[in-house]
Amino acid sequence: MINELDCCDSHHNEILKKAYDNMPDDETVFDLSDIFKILSDSTRLKILWAMEGGEICVRGVSELLGISISAVSHQLKTLRRAHLVKSRRDGKNIYYSLDDDHVKKLLEIALEHMRE
């Protein structure tokens, strides 16, 4: 139990208690870890960046990145399952976009951090 810690000094114990109180539960941490695993693939990151400006079709992503439609579709399936992208059907065409503004913010913050 965190209340039973006797580490270094009382100030440090307060910091540890605050960290303990703010720590997400294990299931949430595992889910978050899965998101970072998905984002660790460079092709998937490029696909997400391609959608930063709005909807794009599979063929457009394929041409932009120079990879097969099949490869794009496979990556989109992974991104869709992780709720990082969403799709919209218009006749025979399916258009993909970032699921919400949080995805865009994740990309922007990661890029900003990397550039510092």
Image (cartoon, rainbow, N blue to C red):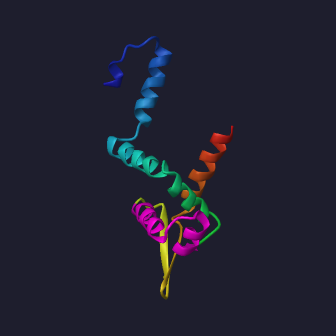
Number of callouts? 0
Residue 10 vs residue 33, the one in the foreground: 33
Quarter containing the N terminus:
top left
Q: Is residue 58 left or right of residue 28?
A: right
Residue 73 x/y as whole percent: 44, 69
In the picture as drawn, the residue positioned furthest to the top comes out as 8
Q: Relative to residue 110, is residue 56 depicted above or below?
A: below
Give the dominant element type of the magenta stretch: helix, strand or loop.
Answer: helix
Residue 27 x/y as whole percent: 33, 45
Q: Is residue 5 magenta?
A: no
Residue 16 vs residue 66, the one in the foreground: 66
Residue at left 57%, top 58%?
46
Residue 32 x/y as whole percent: 42, 47
Residue 105 vs residue 16, the one in the foreground: 105
Whether residue 93 is visible, yes or no, is yes
Q: Is residue 74 magenta?
A: yes
| Residue 20: quadrant of the picture | top left
Residue at left 57%, top 65%?
66
Residue 25 vs residue 108, the one in the foreground: 108
In the picture as drawn, the residue positioned furthest to the left comes out as 1
Residue at left 43%, top 47%?
37
Q: Relative to residue 91, is residue 112 depicted above or below?
A: above
Residue at left 37%, top 13%?
6
Q: Relative to residue 33, is residue 53 depicted above or below?
A: below
Write the start and end of the magenta stretch as one range.
56-81
Quarter containing the C terminus:
top right
Residue 7 x/y as whole percent: 41, 13
